[in-house]
Amino acid sequence: MTNASTMDHKDLALRRQLLLCTCCGSRATGRQFHNQDTGHGLGDCCVDFVRPRTEDMERTYGVAGVHYLLDPLVKVRTPDAPAQWGHWSISQNLTDRWGEINEAEPDLKLVQPLLISNPGLLDRLRSQMHEEDTFVVHKGGRWGILFELEHYCRESDANAQGVNSHEYPPQAVVEKGLLDGMRAIASQFPGVDFAVPGPGNTYNDRPAAWAFVPDGLLNPDQREQLGTALGSLLRIGAELAKTDPQATSGAA
Ligand SMILES: [Zn+2]
């Protein structure tokens, strides 16, 4: 379990564009792959047709999620640039928290059929899930596990959780604490990507801590350590702010 790809595919830097499907000539959204003629690429229309007929899909057509069957772009803030929005290229919720395939919103998980048709891959990913905090996802051209730990805040839960709920801290305060905490723990988990997702990704837009773990990166002990650390982010972030005010300025 040491061959995990710890970086998003470099071609994610290329723009998403309309290409002509190299198989049927239809227009298809994708990214240019270097082994295909300029302006051409494998369309989502023909993935099912070519897969059984192609010896090496990656060498011929590129990587699913990156060049075809594109992973959606999701707004996030990351601990190394907490003040600005960035994007993750990620197909979320390919399974639910218990590892069962989740077929809702198929337009946002174009790669899912590749997972369903590969029981060995699905079993391997399921075996890397942690408690009820994780989902199988596809990010930056890689399969992996997304930890998602939600928190209450004033905006998301003030009217839902009872009379004292106005005491929840504001969303911005919770999210800053999460990002501060991530910055403190990130060096302990090289190859894990951390972020706080933007609106539309959690129940009631609750603040959440995301950590993407590429397939095979962590052993069970390391997954346990990551789960524990993610559950302690707000405390870790608060302590960091006390001892090192500069660390919370985004200049880490
Ligand atoms: Zn086609």
Image (spheres, rainbow, N blue to C red):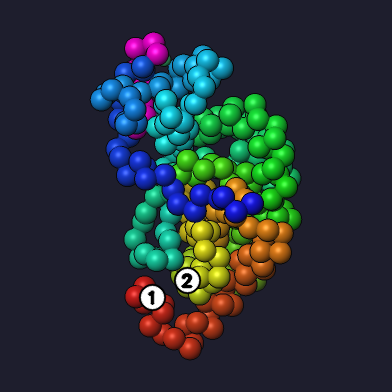
Horizontal and vertical percent position of residue 48: 53, 18
Q: Residue furthest top?
A: 24
Q: Which residue is mark 2?
A: 183
Camera-side residue of 247 and 43: 43
Q: Neighbour class for label 2 at 10 Å: few (<14), some, many (≥20)?
A: many
- At 56% from the left and 50% from the top, the residue drawn is 3
Give left or right: position of 172 versus 133: left
Give the label on residue 252, or none. Answer: 1
Q: In this view of the protein, which residue sits in the foreground, 168 or 251?
A: 251
Q: Quadrant of the C terminus?
A: bottom left
Question: Is residue 96 in sight in this rendering?
Answer: no
Residue 174 screen position, x and y as percent: 51, 69
Which region is colored magenta? 23-31
Q: Earlier in the sequence, mark 1 or mark 2?
A: 2
- Residue located at (44% from left, 86% from top): 244
Vertical relation: 234 (above or below) 91: below
Q: Is residue 29 magenta?
A: yes
Q: Amino acid at mark 1?
A: Ala
- Label 1 close to label 2 by CB (< 8 Å): yes
The residue that appears at 48% across and 26% down in the rendered structure is 57
Identity of the residue drawn at 53% across and 59% down: 192
Q: Position of residue 39 (x, y in %)?
A: 27, 24
Q: Label 1 to label 2, Cα distance in Å?
A: 8 Å
Displayed-image quarter of ligand 1: top left
Judged from this view, the residue extending furthest toward the left is 38
Task: Find residue 20 and report its image quarter.
Answer: top left
Query: Would you say 39 lies left or right of 90 here?
Result: left
Check disc 2 and give the amino acid type.
Arg
- Look at the numbered disc 1 and give the secondary structure of its residue: loop
Please tell me whether mark 2 sits on a helix, a strand or a loop: helix
